[in-house]
Each structure stands twice: as structure tokens, then as C-alpha cells.
Amino acid sequence: MTLAVPVTVDPTAPAARPQQLGRWRRLPLKAKVGAVLLGFFVLAAIIGPLVTPYNPSFQNPAPALSMHAPDGAHLLGTTQTGQDVLSQLLVGIRLTLELAFVVGVIATALSVLVGVTAAFLGGFWDELLSLLSNVFLVIPALPLLILLLGYLPQKGQLATILVLSVLGWPWGARVIRAQTLAIRNRDYIAASRETGESSWRIITYEIVPNEISLIAANFVNTVLYAIGASVALAFIGLADLNSWSLGTILYWAQSQQALQLGAWWWFAPPGLAVALIGTSLVLLNTGIDELGNPRLRDAGVDLRLGGRRIRPTDPTPVMNAAPPRRGPVAAFLHSFSRSSLLGEGGLGEGGLGDESGTSR
Amino acid sequence: MSAPTLGPVSSGPAVSGPVLDIRDFSVVYRTPGGDVRAVDKVNLALHPGEVVGLAGESGSGKSTLAYGACRLLRPPALITGGSIRYAGRRLTTPADVLKMRPEELKRMRWREIAIVFQSAMNALNPVLNVRDQLVDVIHAHLKMTREEAHDKAASLLDLVGIPRNRLRSYPHELSGGMRQRVMIAMALATDPEVVIMDEPTTALDVVVQRDILAQIVELKETLGFSILFITHDLSLLLELADRIAVMYAGQLMEVGTADEIHREPSHPYTKGLLNSFPSLRGPRRDLAGIPGSPPDLRNPPPGCPFLPRCDYGTDACTSVGMSLAKVSSSADPNHVTACPFVLPDTPRPPHKIRAEAPAAAEEVTS
Amino acid sequence: MSFIIRRLVFYLIAAWVALTANFFIPRAMPGNAVQDIMSKFPSLQPSAYRALEAMLGIGHPGSLWHQYVSYLNDVVHLNFGLDVTEYPAKVSTLLGQTIPWTLTLVGTATVIAFLLGTGLGIVAGWRHGGWTDRLLPGLMFLQAIPYFFLALVLLDLLAVNLHWFPIGQGYGQGLIPGWDWTFISSAIYHSLLPALTIVLTSVAGWMLQMRNVMITTIGEDYVLAAQAKGLSSRRVVFTYAARNALLPQLQGFGLALGFVVSGALVMEIVFSYPGIGELLLTAVTSNDFPLMQAIFLVITFTVLLANLVVDMIIVVADPRARAREGAR
């Protein structure tokens, strides 16, 4: 992870209604790919440690097995001390994902709390909380994390979770605050206030449900940040070095000179796993973004004419004949298949319309 | 200086023909849920020096019609038929906008047909000052040195009554009214034949509105361009326009001179619109709106789209072909309506049981 | 002008928060840090222990306020104390030796990556929907790769196996740092692979971000208006779309700087590059707290300063920022 900047979500875009989120088929293709990929890793996290071929910590003293390339017995080779890399990887995926999800939950909860509170209280408290969020956004996270974790005597999973959560909320708080402000000014909230609904009820039942897609995107971003940060911290040694998270595997690979000794199977799999998990999260997030922000979604609408996709900046295309009107059932079936082809990358030739106007 | 395919002014076609002739024009939006028929076989002609008002509620297709005529609609919009014949004085022969190549389109845009957008704050580039934006337009179509362009920009501001010191201002530094005037100045920069005005005064307060409208009329008289004025405010058009076209659900309901539409509206929708706003003079009366909302244009019902909201509707309306026919009782020979059953003097049925809205609804339309 | 001043005040506040956090963290943490150090480095002078104790606030070195003031005083005088691992070297000296390396490498690579990524993003945004969209999943993957991991991969492929680049270090062995061409050319040669790593993975991020901003910007009315005016495509793309899209892009750059710098530091470790990254590793492995704290402060201040510079660029580029004097 480059501790990448989270994908931006436009807080002023109209929020998705809660019903829209159940529509799996409405999700763009890339979100589905991301979800499937992530699902694969989650599955690995759940089952992995139960099916490890060896005990990841088992050190095999046989010198022939030290830094051994992948073969039938060890699918991903062995480490310096003869430990099986695949087993470590399987355990690592679980530890890393576990940590990242917990941090995601805690930090997102904090973001929502701070963001909604700031938006609702307004005035001095809003200014203060906003200032605090902005300050912690601009202060680079990793050095501060290093400092915090460095001083803690225990650098295990729990400590890391705590430390990451403490620094993980500002981004989400800012975004949620903006969205809450926008919603708060809308008429139906004013109406609820007029009828005397307590602020608490307004928040829980009217504001938060409208921010679900924003909160979901925020959660994904936080998990992304947590993975990147924890792996980086572990890589420089700020973790429980006796446990097998993806970061600690990399730490050991680095400190045992895996690179110089040509043992690529030691550092490539865990790194690749991190990159793939990260990619899946970004894909998922882009999809959630498009769900919540109609403008991005419309920008992805695929209109083809004569095999060539029409860009937003082209003149409006002219077609010779409109396609025949479809009955409701045909239209439903048609939309079902087309929507699964919509999305980035121009996947599928099922473009919408061509010059001959033939029905699909 | 005019561009190659557009010839000199003098050899143009006869002045009496329309300068912009929209024939059988149809636009759909291709959405995953189906095709939305935003504009359905519309015929409209704009003559030199004429002000044609295009009235309708939001979603009626009036903006789609206007922007579509310049092919400025973004995907998923698709023009599915018709022709847009432009016959300006600078052209040696009339040209069909729908058949133009991109370069020709670029040359024609603004030079021949200019647009005044609804929200000037959004339509002006926030990072360029007024002079630069005016000069951009000038340089795109006219051959001038930088000095000449700057002078022209300054004189354009004079034209709309903005002090010259505003040339270096940025859009956010101007008031709403001033921004709109800048938009108008920009539209007139290359001396177009047709100016499309998309709700130019909707976002402004009433006093400024009147000012700007007066300015527009004055400029039209001086420079001689035609105006296609789009608005939902029919009352505005009654004063401003020569002819009015009323649009609903992507189709024209009624077209006639402003006078005729005002005194002798024929179509039920027009009547409803006229009943929706009070006149300054005259007896007090109850304001009636048009209850209900426009139809879903993805699966429009057969026959007349206005039927669900129409006071005069009968079962016969579901099989009516939506073509415009002359209003027999009208003094204006070009007064046409889409409703074959209702005339200006057709009395309103005593009470109508409608499925959608209660009879005594007092909702005011937009 | 007032925009810049307000931003400056903000950064000063942020700097103060960082300083105060730096001051309080050692005092707030459980465990006995001094004991750890003493057990790791039994040969340190008693004065070093006393200095450490003072830094950690142990043993009644005066009231908290008194400590705080003298701490701030030290920072202002760039007195970060004595290093533990390389005792009795001063922390500031160590930092001084390594900062130029990191600054040149990371600074140059980041700027190049930003310019390249933004430029590509403009194209991708404008041609949105075309073949450039096929690159998206690949770019997302590239962006998700940790800097240090890409470093490992590139080192393995290009240095260890293909011998195109040296396997780490800042300059050739046996060379003495100086302003002669031999040294400088060696330094440049050794910085190519690290720079490539930074550029490869961050270009993806900038490109994706600029593309998204461009797509949103193209949807704005003034771009449609620009097309309606018959302006040339070049003018519409650059002066109407890209120039406006650049503003959120720059803001994103400022926010991302912290992450970029952090990632680059960890990457330096892989290359054994003589920058702050190596110091960081040493500090962490040896619990060298003075060094850790100093590194934190230096990185934070650099990022804050860079953010201020970005803000100044934004002021130049955005007339609305200049005019933010209050309600208008």
C-alpha cells in the first residue's frame, strides 16, 4: 500500500436512498470484481489457518530445506529457517484482515460520531472538531504511528489496532460532516424538527440511513489505510514479530536478506496479497462511489454507435431509426443483461444501440 | 470575416423563409431502464427577427429540444430522427445541423446560433476573467488582432450596460444580474442569427429580470437576431414573444401568436397554464393549478400524454394521433393545436372524476 | 493574501499540535523506556541517561510547564539531543547528513510523478470511455502496491537478475561524497531505481485522481458552454476543463504528501538508501527515542511546509481563493 489517498466521495452529491443498495445488479462491474476478489481473501482468512499444510512457526532444521524454492512439498517454498511460506501466508491473511476490519469498524464509528456531532452542534464545537480533524489529516500519519507504537512496550495486534484507530478517523469525519450538513439543511429534516422529533431520533432514523453509501465508502477507505499502515509498520519492525501477519512475513524476509539471496518466493506472495487486497478494496469503493453519486454513474454510461463509443465531449450522435419499443417484460430482461455489461473498461460488445436499429 | 463554408452575407436565401427550421425532430435518452423519449417528432420554425417562446414545465423537453438542435446533448442522448435546417444570411445554402461534420459544427456554433445559459454562475469559467472569456469567443470565430479583440470585448460590455472596469473581474466578483448580462454580451459577440435563451432570468429577482428582458428586446431590435426563448413562465412570454409554442411530455401541444394564445387558448394544457398565474389587472379569481405530474417518458401511454391531467379528456383521447392541426376558430392561420376535440370556446365539463387528483385541488404548477 | 495567512496560521497550529504530541507521548506511555535503553546500551554515559530522563519526564526534572518551555526552546534551536545508538553523535547531525538525500530523491520523484500522472489523467479524463479505461484496473493495482514491495520486486528483477541497476546504496562503494562528477553521477545512477519505484506507483494514483476530477469537471456547465461556443478542443480541454480540475487535484496532492513521504521512507530501507528511512529503521530497532522523535518532527514540518507551498500555488491558480476576504 502506498498508504494511498482514499478515493474521493463527493459529499454534496445527492445521497443514495437506502433501497437502492440492495440492488446487486445495479453495481458496476468493477465493484463486483472487487467484491469477489475481496471475498476470496476473506474466505482465505476464515479457512486458511485451518488448512495450513504445516505449522507456520515450525522451523525445519534440515539445511537443505532452508530457503528452498517452491516444490511439491512446499508450494511457496521455505524461509531461512525452513518454515513453510504458504502456511505463513494463510495465517497472515487472516491476521492482517482481522486487524484491518476491526480498525475499520472502530475508526468509522469514530468518524461518524465526530462528523455528525460537529455538523449538528455547529458553532464553536464544529469549528474545534473540524480544526482537530484537519490538523490530524495534515500531520503525516506514519511517523506519528511509529512514535506511538515505538513507545508502547507491547507492539502486538491490540496495540496496533488501538494506535491505528486513533489516527484513522479524521478523513471520514470530514466527509461525513460535510454530508450531514448538506442533509441537515434539507427540508424534510426541518420538517422533522418542526414536529418536535428529538435530535437523537433525527440522527438515527433520518440522517444516518441516508449516508449509508458514504459510510460504507469510508469504511472501505479506512480498511485500506489500516492494511497499508500496519504492513508498513510491521515491515520496519513495529509489530509482534513472533506472529505471522503479512507485514511481519515481509519483515523477516527483508531482515534475512531474502532479496539478495534470491528467495523471491518469500517476499512476493505476501506483498502480492497486500496489493490484491488493496486493489479489491479500491475497486469496491469506486463501485460504491458510483452508486452514491449519480454523476459518476452517468459518466460511465455506455453509448455506442457504429461500434464506436460516444464520449461526453462528442456532438450528440444522430441515428437513423429508433429501435422498436419493447414490452415491459422484454425491457426488464434486456436491462438485466445490459446492466451487467455496463461499467469501465468497455467490457462486452453489448453496446446500446447501433445504426441498424436492430432489436436485441 | 466569415469561415469558408459560410459565404458572404448578401447572397443568402430569401429573408421570409425560416432561419431555423426544426422538422420531425426526435431525441431519446438511452438509459438502462429503457429509452426515454424526451422529444417526439417536433416541428418548429424560427423566422428572422422573430421571438419564439417555448413554454413548458420541467421535464417537458424544451431544453432538450434547444440543446439538441445544436447537438450539445451529452450521452446517453441520441437524436433519432428529423432535420434541423439552418438558413442564416451568411450561408450560401442552408445546412442541416444533423448532417454537419464536427468542424462545420464548431464553426457554426455560436457564430450562427448562440446560447444564453440559465445559470451564468455555472456557465462562466471560474478561473478566467470576463475579458479573457469574451476574447476566447471572439478569437474562435473572427480574425482580429489582440488589440482589436480587446476593444471589441469592451464595446460588448458597453452594449449590455456594464462598466468597462469589469473587464478584469472574475465571475464570482459580479452580481447575478451582471453575470447574466455578460452571458448575453458573450452570446452576441459574433453577431449570431439565432440566440437560444434557456430560462435566462429564472435565477434572478423580479426587478433585475425586467431590466434584462428590456435590454434583450432592445438588442434584438438593434442587431436583428431571432430568439428562441425557453421558459416555464408563460406569463413572461405573453409579453415578450411573437409566437409561443407550448410543449408537454416531449411534444408540442399548441403553437400560435402570443396574442392568440393569450386571448384564445385552444389546448386544455395551455388553458391550464394560463389559469395558473394571476394577472395584475382584472377581476379576482381562484387560482387553479394542473394537478398531477408529467408521464414517464420511458413507456408513454398511447394517445395524448396529457390525458391523465386533462379536464376535458375522454376515452377517445387514447387513440388520438398527436399531430398539430389548425384551430378553425382562430384569426391566426398558423395557430395549431394537438387536441382535435377542444377549441378556445369549448366549455369546461362541470365536474370530472379523475383517478389521480381530487377535483378541488389547488396545487399550483411549477 | 488573507487566504495564505489563514493557511499559515493553520499550519502553525498543526505544528504546535505535533510538537505537543511529541512532548507528551513519551511521558504518557506505559512501561519504562529508560530501562529498555539502559539494558540495550549499558555503555552510555550517565549524562546521556540524565538527558533521556529529562526527555522522558522521569525523576522530577522540574514542573511540567518548565519542561515544556525548555523543550520548545530546544526545538527552536534545532537541538534534538544526543543520539543513543551512535552516541555521542548529535541527532541533528545525523539528520543533517540524511535529509538532503531523502529530499532530493523523494522531492524530485514526487514532483515528476505528479506532473506525469496529472497530465495522463487529463488525457484519460477527456477520452473517458475509450481505450484508456482499459488501463484502470491495472492502475488501481499499481496504486495498491506498497512502495517498499514494488522496490523489492524491481530490485529483484532489474538489479539482481538483469544487472541494469545497482542493488541499493546511495552511491558506489569506496566513493567519497563530494561535488565531483564521479560521485554525482554514481549518486544519480543509484537513485534511478528508487525514483522509478516512487514514480511508478504514485503516477497511478495521481492519474486516477485527475481522471475522476476531470470527469466531474467535464460535467460542469461551463465546459458545455465552452463547447457551445465553438472553441477549439484544445482550449476546452486545457483552459476550461483541466485548469479547473487542477484545483481539487492540487488539494489532493497536499493531503497525500504525508502518505507519499511515509511510503518513500520505508522504501528507502529496501534500497539501503542513505536517507532518513535508514535512520528510521535504526531508531525503531534500537528504541532510539531521541532519534524517533526528531524524525517525526522533521518529517511533519517538511510536510506542513510543502502543504503551504501547494496552498500558495493554489492561490495563484484560483482567483476565488484570492478573493476569500469574507462574504462578498
Image (cartoon, helix red, strand yellow):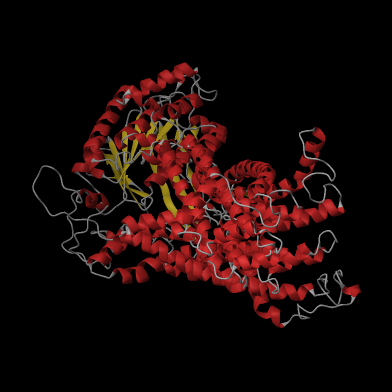
Q: Is C14 left or right of A269, judged from the image as shown?
A: left
- Residue at (48% x, 28% y) in the render: B136
Q: Nearer the viewer, residue C306 or C199?
A: C306
How far from the left and from the top, in percent, is residue B303?
36, 58
Q: Nearer the viewer, residue B271 or B168?
A: B168
Q: Nearer the viewer, residue A329 or C39?
A: C39
Kindly tell me whether residue B141 is visible in this rendering. yes
Q: Is C325 left or right of C132, judged from the image as shown?
A: left
Q: Is A155 left or right of A114, judged from the image as shown?
A: right
Q: Quadrant of residue B169?
A: top left
Q: Quadrant of residue B295?
A: bottom left
Quarter holding the N terminus of chain C is: top left
- Total labels: the figure holds 0
Kindly tell me whether residue A29 is visible in this rendering. no
How far from the left and from the top, in percent, is residue B62?
37, 46
How far from the left and from the top, in percent, is residue B145?
50, 17
- Hey, which residue is sitting farthest left in the picture? B283
- Residue at (73% x, 48% y) in the render: C274
Q: Is residue C322 above or below residue B38?
A: above
How far from the left and from the top, in percent, is residue A136?
49, 56
